[in-house]
Image (cartoon, rainbow, N blue to C red):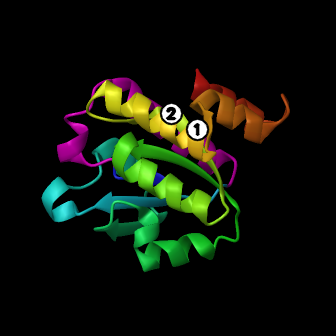
Amino acid sequence: MVIDVQEKIFATMHEQIDTEQNINRIIEGSKVLGLPIVWTEQYPKGLGPTISSVRENLEGYDHQEKLFFSCFGDEAIKESIGTLKRNQALLCGIEAHVCVYQTARDLLGDDYDVYIVTDAVMSRKESNYHLALDKLRDLGARLTSVEMALFELQQIAKGETFKAISQIIK
């Protein structure tokens, strides 16, 4: 899931360049690995659209608008996720302590295995970012990074997907 990487709020994040690059890397790696992607926008009329590089990278994937902070608060999104017939969720986006946190909390409560891509989530304040990761770990979410997640999903250092993943990571 790519959660709420929207122009107006993204402009207030610290570490914007690294976060944007890492969100795009996890999207590109997910495409190579054939993973389904659901992406959301929180109240786009007020917070604007998803930043252009991420929006372009997500073209053709399941897009959902929402008002609830948790993606699981919206029945259409919950249903969309349910139709994927997966029990694991890999989350990136903003803000770590609000929409990412509440979505992860609700997914965990619905018996999903949740992985937070720590270098592809962010908050406006670094203290909120760290607090969110601490609370998510306490709830049972697993913390990972872009590189760690993609190579863990890849599992073997050979083949075309390995070559493609390696290029994304560089």
Residue drawn at point x = 70 percent, y = 62 percent:
87
Q: Which residues are magenta?
A: 5-34
Whether residue 47 sits left or right of residue 118 in the image: it is left
Q: Which secondary structure class fits the magenta region best? A: helix
Residue drawn at point x = 43 percent, y = 49 percent:
100
Q: How many marks?
A: 2
Quarter of the image containing the C terminus? top right
Secondary structure type for disc 2: helix
Q: Look at mark 1 in the image and give the residue it sits on.
A: 137
The answer for how far apart the CA atoms under marks 2 and 1 are is 5 Å
Front residue of 17/141: it is 141
Label 1 crowd bin: few (<14), some (14–19), many (20+), radius 10 Å: some
| Contact? badges 2 and 1 (CB < 8 Å) | yes
Whether residue 49 sits left or right of residue 102 in the image: it is left
Q: Position of residue 54 (x, y in %)?
A: 38, 45
Whether residue 87 sits left or right of residue 110 in the image: it is right
Q: Look at mark 2 in the image and give the residue it sits on.
A: 134
User: Is 21 colored magenta in this rendering?
Assistant: yes
Front residue of 70/59: it is 70
Q: Amino acid at mark 2?
A: Asp
Q: Amino acid at mark 1?
A: Arg
Q: Position of residue 147 (x, y in %)?
A: 63, 28
